[in-house]
Image (cartoon, grey):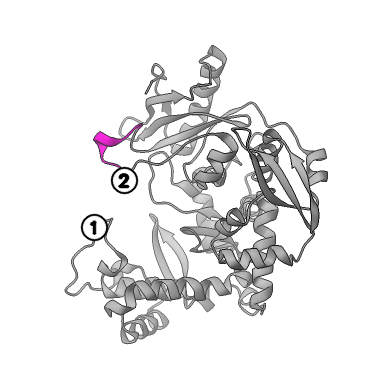
Amino acid sequence: MTSSSFSLTNKQTRHVWLGLQSMSAPPCGKRTNADFANRVESLGMVQLDSIGIVSRAHHHILWSRQSAYRSTAYDALLQQDRAVFEHFSHDAVILPMSTYPYWQRQHTRRAALYSQAVWSKDMAPKKTRQQIINHIEENGAVCSRDFTKVNAKPAKRSAHAWARPAHKLALDYLWLNGTLSVSHRENFTKFYDLTERVIPQTYRDTDISEANQINWLCENALQRLGVASAMEIQKFWEACSLSEVQAWLLKPSIDIINVHYADAQGNRVDAFAPASIEQQLDEIRQPSSRVRIISPFDPIARDRARLKRLFDFDYRIEIYTPKDKRKYGYYVYPIVEGDRFIGRIEVRANRNTDTLDTYAWWLEPNVKLTDARVAKLSKELERLSKLAGVTHTAELPALSFI
């Protein structure tokens, strides 16, 4: 790593980030399973989320980059092609199957964290876990509701993990530690099977040392971020500790350089980048001026601190905020135009009327309301209706103000 620091502007840093996350060019129209699997590979991972106001987050994220993507494609990626697997990063995520050998330490880490939270409550003893393994060996893949809940009250959404019934705790633990894997989903319900029946043997048998796993995780985080601090590298996968990332930066396994860039306020930010950053800047393309409505869990928006630093866009999701205390709405989507976050919109698929409805939308203080911008947003709503599976798009209401 060089001691001198390479300088980037805020715009350059944004363009590098958007380009690496496939958000510079308009969405491509490729539609094969291999194309969708390659997209997951290029992103590194895709967040799973159950809320389907328009479409579930993982579908929305992939559609934003490949307009031909539809939700049914994921079933093929997971169950038929075994091109991806599900596990836990910052949250439940989809990962390319090629990542599996480098994810072994994460199985251990996540299971240990989970057990620290629930095992002291003795809610899922070893006997319960073994009974579940035996049942799956004999009967095949199961979901949580396949087990009888004895003396267990349904847990509220906000309840702690240990408030779940014992069989659910055991399933979670066995999934986290790698004994079980998600074999498929039905209406978003997870089905678990023995890992040897789900993960192809070539990936299960690949033995990689823990040190090399850490190297790979740090390398791939930085390469997908382009420019990042140690904390941002750590937060990308959340499969290493910050101290492990910092140790890697002192003795990296790829050529990296010190860089600094201007944040959205013009302040200097010190960071790191692959040594190829200068070549990336030469090859960088101007982001399309297309307007996009993205998932709140999209990779370019998921790290809210990075989002604020690079784009000066202060975003939070308010689904857990009491209605009378929400600033915007229950589920409000960020709006991107080119290399800027220009606003947000509350939109919902009304499947009773077969219509995509817009309840309200807002522009950022420094963004002007123009006919061209309204036309581009209306066009994006028409495209979004196809992802939502509805035929009609309601008329865009007047601009809202805070």
Mark drawn on residue 89: none
Q: Examine the structure image and report whether residue 202 is included in the region drawn in magenta.
A: no
The residue nearer to you, when weighing 270 against 310, is 270
Position of residue 316 relative to residue 155, above or below, is above
Query: Residue at coordinates 65% horizontally, 33% vertically from top-left?
Result: 26
Main secondary structure along the magenta-highlighted residues: loop
The residue nearer to you, when weighing 257 against 128, is 257
| Quadrant into which the N terminus falls | bottom right
Position of residue 289 relative to residue 271, above or below, is above
Residue 71 in view in this figure: no
Q: Is residue 127 left or right of residue 364?
A: left
Q: Which residue is mark 2?
A: 320
Residue 34, how many percent across, how many down?
Answer: 65, 54
| Quadrant into which the C terminus falls | top left
Q: Is residue 276 left or right of residue 180?
A: right
Q: Amino acid at mark 2?
A: Tyr
Mark drawn on residue 156: 1
Residue 142 in view in this figure: yes
| Region in magenta | 321-328
Q: Amino acid at mark 1?
A: Lys
